[in-house]
Amino acid sequence: VKRGVIRIVTPGTDLSSGESDGSNNYIAAIYKDKKSYGLAFADVSTGDFYTTETSDMSKVIDEVQKYDPSEFIYNSAFSDEQPDFISDETAKKKLCSEADRSYFLQENAEDVLKRHFKVYSTAALGLDGTPASLIASGALTAYLLDTQMNDLSHMNEIHPYSIGRYLVIDHSTYRNLELTETMREKEKRGSLLWVLDHTKTAMGARKLKNMMEHPLLDVAEINGRLDAIDELSASMVDREEIREYLSGIYDLLRLLMKFSYKSANPRDLLAFKDSIKPLGP
């Protein structure tokens, strides 16, 4: 029997974390240069990948609060500048590691992103003009490829976003409003999310949480979302039919991850078959 290391499991790459309740388990990369911070957040169990950049450390803290990653990697400049942040996150039992400087070289970051996402230029990923975001994303991608030891084919899309596109909710306000968890018990039950979450799929539950954590500012986008809600609200028959179809759908993103890791079992294959059956031939 051939023996060897096939995958390195870390808190941020634990595939079983969040499987019972459908929640995300993010790993974060933070890159600090002279003027700004690049942030990248990925969940290898679902393929979600988000990135942004800011010049304000307080906004870094706010974004970390929203994604609540269980592991951080960062460059030496960030480590030197923010020892208190690292100490605070370590105290919360988060794994914090200064990664090798080669991960944070711009040339290496661009190369790994172009190879993994199969694009000719990082501009195709929406990373043109955001060098700190690009480097953080490249460093995180390289780290995941090195530790997971497979091609991570299910992670096929990256979502750059501007913090200014969303209403900024600072750390204290986020906690006091109990948007996604209660202050005392740190549980979903009793929070605003618990009241609103009547989703039928794990994917929908994660989407709703993400929308609550990133309130829109653009009036046209807000009205578009409200129009969609109004249409579904006005058509009870269609709404209930959609909910019935969705109730039989498993967590497709996590199933695709298992296919990518070649760890799917017969039960997973049956779940995938049942999930795509409503789509028809």
Image (cartoon, rainbow, N blue to C red):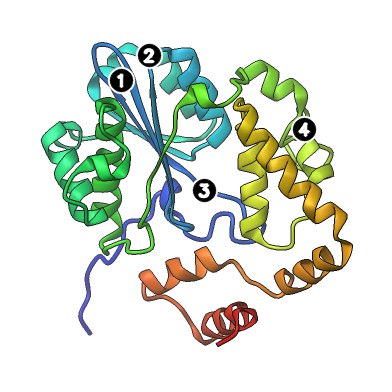
Instruction: Name the side, left or right, on which 119 lies relative to 266.
Output: left
Residue type at mark 1 is Ser
Q: Quadrant of residue 109?
A: top left
Instruction: Name the side, left or right, on which 187 lies relative to 281.
Output: right
Residue lying farthest left?
Answer: 107
Residue at 30% x, 39% y is 137
Q: Which mark is residue 272?
A: none
Q: Residue 175 appears at what percent x and percent y?
A: 70, 24
Q: Residue 246 appears at what percent x and percent y?
A: 71, 69
Q: Residue 260 appears at what percent x and percent y?
A: 37, 70
Q: Residue 211 appears at what percent x and percent y?
A: 63, 39
In the displayed structure, 14 sits above or below 273; it is: above
Front of the two marks 2 and 3: 2
Residue type at mark 4 is Thr
* Disc with the residue nearer the chain's start (1 vs 4): 1
Number of marks drawn: 4
Instruction: Name the side, left or right, on which 261 lies relative to 245.
Output: left
Q: Quadrant of residue 171?
A: top right
Name the residue tied to disc 2.
55
Name the residue tied to disc 4.
182
In the displayed structure, 16 sits above or below 135; it is: below
Crowding at label 2, few (<14), some or many (≥20) Cα neighbours within 10 Å? some
Name the residue tied to disc 1.
79
In the displayed structure, 91 sits above or below 190; it is: above
Crowding at label 1, few (<14), some or many (≥20) Cα neighbours within 10 Å? many
**How far apart are the alpha carbons under marks 2 and 4?**
30 Å
Dots 3 and 1: beta carbons under 8 Å? Answer: no
**How far apart are the alpha carbons under marks 1 and 4?**
31 Å
